[in-house]
Amino acid sequence: MPDQPAILVADKKNALRVQAATVAAHRAGIRRGMTVSEARSRCPQVETELLDEDAESEDLHALTAQLLRVSPTIAPLPPEAVVAEVGRVPEGLVGQERTLIERVRIRMNQLGHLAHVVVADDPIIALRVAQWERRSTLIPQGDGAQAIAPLPLQALELPNRDLSFLNSLGIHTIGQFAQLPAAEINGRFGPHVVAAHALSCGRTQPTLINTWPENGSPCITQDLPAPVTELEALFFVIGAMVRDLTTRLIARNQATTQVDITFRLDDGRHQSLTFCLGPPSRHATTILDHIRRRLERLQLGGPVVGLTLSSHQPTDFDGRQIDLRDPRRRDEAVEAISAQLQDALGSRSVLGARTTPRHRPEGAWRPVPFGIPVPRTTGTAAVAQALSHCDDPVDAWQGHPEPICPERPPILLRPPPVIEVEVNQESVLTAIHLDGRWHHVSHVLGPEQIAGEWWSSPFQRTYWRATLDDGRTAWLYREHGRWLLHGWWDR
């Protein structure tokens, strides 16, 4: 309840820190980013609750979709804000903007949220005012720097080391920070502080907010205020873009199996990455986990000035959560693992197998990229396929079932090694020499004659399936008077 001091906390920067606070907690001096101990020192009776980031993210996505009626150009600003581009009304019609503020605030209240709606030139300035002044307001055009000047320096979310240094110099408000010479800031601090100083002075870059697409693949573009070379800074921007992407997917009831990121470099070149997700997903944390693993070993071709994030062929999402006991979870796990391997090794290094109509066992399959479904044959093609597997065309046309294919071992050796064997008087295998010793054959099946391909490389082999005394089952064949070990069955 708003009149009850309560805070949402999460593990940030190696400590439980405040992520959101009720009005009563805010009045007691509790601010976002404080540790729990700091919050309790200001308000001992404050109640704490651990933040459920997944639930909060889903809630923010739902709120963003609700505001589509306000503007199609809209995006989430995690963890607790939404930004929409509404444009500027002509002078003398400012009341329309105030009416819009009330409409949004009332709609949020109807949905069970206490919202602070701020209209400003820059979305970051509007966000800081909403977070720290806790009120709805209209900031006149060009007055963004004056609006945030009274706010504490913590509102700029500077790194702790830089914040402590500035506080030691007696700088405690954004207005005081803005009075520092820009040359001194550029020479002493990193890009995060430089960008924050530009914001405090009102020198902001226009933020590109993408129009919510009705159809096609969602594509999000973000220009950076200055060239960036630090991967951690890029990941911070990508995180916001991914949450924007997942919001759009949720609003369209879709999910994606692949995300593409293009880095626009300052020399005009582009560097692109593709991230395979495995099973369809619209979960921001899952997508970011894939991206972070890949970015850890990325070598940028130069400073980055812009990014583009797109979803490759999103699919419809049925909203069904598969039970852990469902055997289909095994396929989902294979898809997820194969996607991680493709990201790590490349798509050409992770392959599946597809059968081909060849007589030679080692040529009866071909490698294909993992995850490509086997095409289903229907209609005339299905009849042709049935005819190719049946000697009697009448039986094939009548739907006669295809003959059962003989079992083949899952492990084939390439090339098959030549081995020594012992046979009895009936030419039946009795022992095989492997791994430097003789193994007794406890059970044998065969012979099976396989021949063909006279038009290219004709062959004629006699195959045997032999179970050894140690439990292994081998597949052997005899050709040109030699015995060769062609494969193994799993135990």
Image: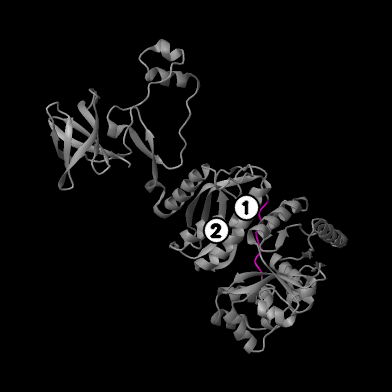
Quarter assignment of residue 222 = bottom right
Crowdedness of circle 2 by 10 Å Cα count: few (<14), some, many (20+)?
some
Question: Of 204 and 50, which appears nearest the observer?
Answer: 50
Residue 397 image position (x, y, % from top left): 45, 13
Assess whether residue 338 is covered by the magenta stretch.
Answer: no
Question: Of 48 and 437, which appears nearest the observer?
Answer: 437
Secondary-structure class at tag 1: helix
Residue 115 image position (x, y, % from top left): 78, 63
> Which part of the image, by quadrant, shows the C terminus?
top left
Quarter assignment of residue 225 = bottom right
Amino acid type at circle 1 is Thr
Question: Of 112 and 177, which appears nearest the observer?
Answer: 112
Residue 344 image position (x, y, % from top left): 42, 55
Q: Does residue 250 appear to the left or right of 29 in the view shown?
A: left
Q: Does residue 313 appear to the left or right of 346 in the view shown?
A: right
Q: Which residue is mark 2?
A: 288
Quarter assignment of residue 136 = bottom right
The correct choice, above or below, for 411 with respect to 162 in the image is above
Amino acid type at circle 2 is Leu
Q: Which residue is mark 1?
A: 246
| Highlighted range, magenta | 204-211
Q: Residue at x 66, y 54 (%)?
A: 210
